[in-house]
Amino acid sequence: MKKAITIFILITLICMLTYELYIIYQNMPRQPKALLVEQKNSDLKPENIISNVMQFSENMRFNHNTISYNIASDCSPDEKLRMESALLELSTKTQIISFKSGDENSDILISCSEIKLQKDENIFIAGEGGPSRYINNTIYPVILRGRILLYSKSNCQSSLVEMHELLHVFGFDHSQDDTDLMFPRSDCSQELKQKYINKLKELYLIKPLAELYFKDIDNITRSGKYLSFKVTIVNKGILDATDVNLSVYAEDEKLNSFDLGDINLGEGQKFTIENLKLPSLDTQEILLRIESKNEEYDYENNVLKASG
């Protein structure tokens, strides 16, 4: 009986020692090994908008369809009326863009001046307009703020000068067609060409969304049961992404989720993790997944797969 107890204790000790050695083996330091990374191409292109209309930056737009404006107090009642007539005309013809009066933080700031600027001999600039702030590293370059400065009253009955500067705010460049109101020199017979209306309709029918993806993936390594990585997550969409999380999965099991907060349009977030413990040495597939409540243009590039 005593011998049997001794054998049982010995076997128990051997089992315990074997288990301890196994645990030590599982967690002992190892030479870091770079993992093979697979991801969907994140070079998402804008929808194919065919147009012969030149813009300062191709397909630039505001990221909303109701655009606020503010007309400064230095504009006369007649100048204000002409400007509002141009806004109404563009809204009516596009049927998708609308305008609302706002304050000094509005999307478009409009002011007037008695100063006349001479560009070349006998050519005077009636006004200036264009995007004063915009972000160009997004799928569609986003206009953040536009400005219009009207130097002198037009002799035309229509709001030709005001419309000319307004279209500059929407990113449209000058035309070489002298019958086009975007021609550099104004003539009262010039027209608002349908191509501008078509371009605006095409752009503003596209729903503004966020677009998160992995960029600058560095040092995804594994040392035994421990995972380390450095990644940069970028929002290439035209809306801010809120409550963004980076989750790590191993063999379909969620290991951890990291709160990245908000990632504004055109901005990125660098993230580093060291020695995240995996379930076992046998773990073969690891997924990094960008998760948020935001609707995006493409979800497939939110996943990065690492193996090896």
Image: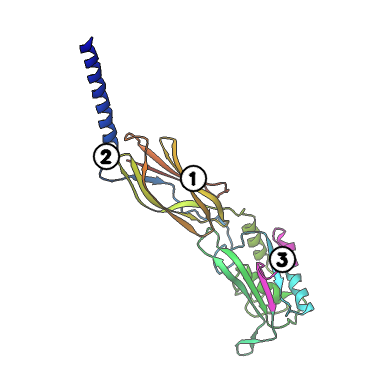
* Viewer-side residue, 163 vs 289: 289
Residue 62 seen in the current view: yes
Quadrant the C terminus occupies: top left
* Residue 300's disc number: 1
Q: Position of residue 229 (x, y in %)?
A: 37, 49
Local SS, label 3: helix
Q: How is the image coloured?
A: rainbow
Q: Amino acid at mark 2?
A: Met
- 108, above or below 42, in the image: below
- Magenta residues, start to end: 88-111
Q: Which residue is mark 3?
A: 90
* Viewer-side residue, 19 vs 5: 5
Q: Earlier in the sequence, mark 1 or mark 3?
A: 3
Q: Position of residue 22 (x, y in %)?
A: 27, 31
Q: Nearer the viewer, mark 2 or mark 3?
A: 2
* Viewer-side residue, 245 vs 118: 245
Q: Which residue is mark 2?
A: 28
- 85, above or below 125, in the image: above
Q: Quadrant of residue 305?
A: top left
Q: Amino acid at mark 3?
A: Leu
Give the Cα distance between marks 1 and 3: 37 Å
